[in-house]
Amino acid sequence: MSFTNLLFRITPFLLVLVLSGCAAWLKPDLQRTITQIESGNYSLDPEHAVLLFKIDHMGFSKFVGRFNTFDANLNYVPEDITQSSLEAIVDMTSVDVNNDKFERALNGSFWLSTKQHPKAHFKTVAAEQISPEQLRFEGELTFLGVTKTIYVDVTVNGAANNLLTNKYTIGFSASAAFKRSEFGLDTFIPTVGDDIELEIHAEFQQN
């Protein structure tokens, strides 16, 4: 076998080894403790964020959907977590349930009334640390023109400089729950559940 043919055969394996090494090198050493993360203002990275909602369907299952367009800003103060704040805006017209016909129905006045209320807004009024890696935001959710207090529980996955973007990045998972009837949306209760569960997975980049 000629040297050229040998090189041609082993090149794919060499590439796999090199890329595997690079992949390991790119994985950051995350700071996971809330107080160790850098303070500052952060903006949502929309390419690495998901907002899911879940609602009971006749007791058979959880119906799961998502909103594809939303934005958020985080002011993070680890030395005094009570001074931290989060603000988010959701484009309600971006509701996605993998069913075009039902999405049109959800946008209508029977459900989300997105012509009258195209945005939902959340803004914190308080924050507290509840464990070395968890914090809780108390905030006001404005949905369908009604404002109520809800709580968002956040688990900090970690923070580090992202070598792909060269930006210091915080990653977290969060959850919240509220009763839709409290916002005036009582369609088909109790066949369709009253309790809405929110699940958020997101990365925030330091400004």
Image: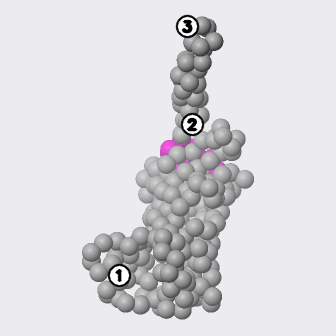
Amino acid type of the residue tagged 1 in the rendering: Gly
Residue that extends furthest to the right in the rendered view of this protein: 207
Q: Is residue 107 above or below residue 75?
A: below
What residue is rendered at 41% in x and 76% in y? 196
Residue bearing mark 1: 193
| Dot placed on the residue nearer the N-terminal end, 1 or 3 | 3
Q: Is residue 108 left or right of residue 199?
A: right
Q: Specify few, some or many for label 3: CA neighbours under 10 Å numbering under 14, 14-19, or 20 or more.
A: few
Q: Which residues are magenta?
A: 31-39
Q: Nearer the viewer, residue 34 or 90?
A: 90
Amino acid type of the residue tagged 2 in the rendering: Pro
Q: Is residue 65 magenta?
A: no
| Callout 1 secondary element | strand
Q: Which mark is residue 1?
A: 3
Q: Is residue 103 above or below residue 13?
A: below
Q: Which mark is residue 28?
A: 2
| Callout 3 secondary element | loop
* Label 1 to label 3: alpha-carbon separation: 69 Å
| Dot placed on the residue nearer the N-terminal end, 3 or 2 | 3
Asked if labels 2 and 3 touch by Cβ distance under 8 angstroms, the answer is no
Q: Is residue 44 above or below residue 89?
A: above
Residue 114, how many percent across, how many down? 59, 85
Q: Specify few, some or many for label 2: CA neighbours under 10 Å numbering under 14, 14-19, or 20 or more.
A: few
